[in-house]
Image (cartoon, helix red, strand yellow):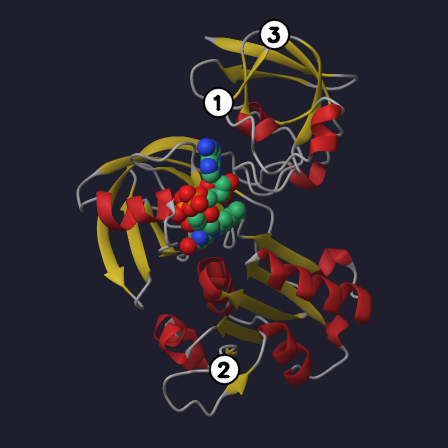
Amino acid sequence: MEHTILIEGGEAFAVSAEEDTLLRGALRAGIGFPHECSVGGCGACRFELIEGELEELWPEAPGLSERDRRRGKRLACQCRPRGRCTVRMRCDDEYRPAVPPERRPAVLESVRPLTADMAEFTFRTATPAAFLSGQYALLYLPGTPGARAYSMSNLANAEGRWQFIVRRVPGGRGSNALFDRLAVGDAITLDGPYGNAFLREEGAREIVCIAGGSGLAPMLSIARAATDRPEGPPVHFFDGVRTPADLCAAPLLGGPAASGRLRYTPVVSGGETGKTWSGARGFVHEAVERDLPGPLDRYEFYFAGPPPMIEALQTLLMQRHRIPYQQLHFDRFL
Ligand SMILES: Cc1cc2nc3c(=O)[nH]c(=O)nc-3n(C[C@H](O)[C@H](O)[C@H](O)COP(=O)(O)OP(=O)(O)OC[C@H]3O[C@@H](n4cnc5c(N)ncnc54)[C@H](O)[C@@H]3O)c2cc1C
């Protein structure tokens, strides 16, 4: 069964009554519904309900402030329509999905430990793994309410292989379910792809990838895709970690790094490193400003990681260096 959703003064679309949130139904229908994280954290998919009935899956989701709630705002990623609805929000072509998201079963094929708290998880689906480098999928994990967003670290492929690099978050339900409750051969539901921080079509600008902690996966996919192109611009890869023991990207970038088009800069932020470290130190955004030959508006920037890193980079690039917003593509790992 499906429910019809009418956007006030605009398009209408159908949402599956059993499975879809308002946001996912809209994106599946090719609507440019603004969104970022899809998991209740960022608030980008706020809308107003004009008419109809909705079920709120996570009423306390942090993406809405108290003021938003008082003004009747809701999150499209956390609302499931209960009938025909009319909603108020502004669509934007920028959010029209480049690859329509699909929900499908995915079987865990292998797990490869990378550091003490990060591992690469490979899933297989019966249909091709169609996505753009930098996008993410939603994984429905055992014993975990809602879905968790994880970015693909590999390249799109016809074999249906989806790779994720996940950090085990102490006390986190989804990440610990991946490490402890899933065995090779188990199936979960994978929904995707989502996200707008994907590698843009080839341009003249040099590419900068900045990973903070577990923000590594989408940056790997972007760097791999960019260096796979026969005649692309150079790629500058900044890898921000707390200690040298957290570094794992270099072997994963092995091929392209060796090709000479990729410059890899690991940056260690922790004071107490535990072993000798002669490379760059400090926060990764500081290394970006210090090491990249200016002016910085000659680069296309891609970055992913924890919200404080994203904010520091936005301040650095947009306010200090006046880089146009269109040259910045990022995901906050909420
Ligand atoms: C776009 C994006 C891409 C990401 N990519 C990666 C990646 O490649 N690798 C990686 O390690 N991490 C990634 N993350 C972070 C990841 O999605 C999880 O937030 C992280 O693994 C912690 O999840 P947890 O379940 O272990 O922790 P928890 O603390 O249990 O859960 C935190 C997350 O779950 C959501 N959540 C909590 N409770 C509920 C509920 N009741 N209903 C619905 N949702 C709920 C929150 O919005 C929050 O995102 C990404 C996040 C985003 C937004």
Which element type, helix, strand or loop, lies under badge 2? loop
Left or right: residue 18 compared with residue 15: left
Among numbered discs 1 and 2, the one appearing first in the sequence: 1
Q: Residues within 10 Å of mark 3 (few under 14, many from 20)?
A: some
Which of the labelled discs sits on residue 271, or is there none? 2
Q: Is 15 in front, or is 141? A: 141
Residue identifier under label 3: 84
| Mark in front: 3 vs 2 | 2
Q: Residue at x 46, y 73 (%)?
A: 242
Relative image position of residue 301 (x, y in whole percent) = 65, 65
**Mark 2 Cβ inside 8 Å of ligand 1:** no
Relative image position of residue 44 (x, y in whole percent) = 66, 38
Among numbered discs 3 and 1, the one appearing first in the sequence: 1
Residue identifier under label 1: 20
Is 248 located above or below residue 23 in the figure? below
- What's the residue type where badge 3 is placed? Arg
